[in-house]
Amino acid sequence: MQFSKQNLLDTSPTWLSLTLASSAAALAITGIGVFFSLTDLSAIDPFTLLLHLVWAIVLSAWVLNLRLKLPPDKKALAAIGAAVAVGSAWSSIQQWLAFVTSGAVNDILLVAGAMVMDVAGGAAAYFFYRFNIAKK
């Protein structure tokens, strides 16, 4: 019985190294936030907006790395959509935790800002992918 080799990633070494570097930077930023107690699971604050941005970049970069049978434009929309979907779920969980723990809700402008950061992160990853990697 012979198994065929199936690659999960469809990317260039340059893009994969950029993705790994952005993942390491996101982990470092999150670690700094945890170390200095800047993270609060039940509140959306400016540091949480930064986390939304960096993790949206990382998530969309990894989606762009995946071997998908989609044209490049639809693949980019899938990456941005994944970043927005995960970010929206994250914001919803934070809203629910804030309501359960204190009975209050987060400022709606910060919740909208988190979604904007998710879109900006996905768009930034697409920009780097499209203009630096896909053009070559």
Image: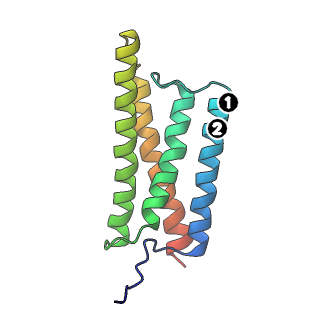
Q: Position of residue 110 (x, y in %)?
A: 44, 26
Question: Tag 2's secondary structure?
Answer: helix
Question: Tag 1's secondary structure?
Answer: helix
Quadrant location of residue 51? top right
| Residue at image mark 2 | 31
Colouring used for the render: rainbow
| Left or right relative to 62: residue 21 | right
Quadrant location of residue 84? top left
In the rendered view, would you say 107 is above or below 3?
above
Query: Does the image show residue 105?
Result: no
The quadrant of the image that shows the C terminus is: bottom right
In the rendered view, would you say 4 is above or below 16?
below
Q: Position of residue 103 (x, y in %)?
A: 35, 10
Please give the name of the residue rendered at 35% of the width and 15% of the height, measured from the top-left corner.
100
Please give the name of the residue rendered at 36% of the width and 51% of the height, measured from the top-left corner.
82
| Image marks 1 and 2: residues in contact by CB distance under 8 Å | yes
In-front residue for pair 1/28: 1
| Left or right relative to 80: residue 54 | right
In-front residue for pair 72/88: 88
Q: Residues within 10 Å of mark 1 (few under 14, many from 20)?
A: few
Please give the name of the residue rendered at 51% of the width and 45% of the height, measured from the top-left corner.
55
| Residue at image mark 1 | 35
Quadrant location of residue 109? top left
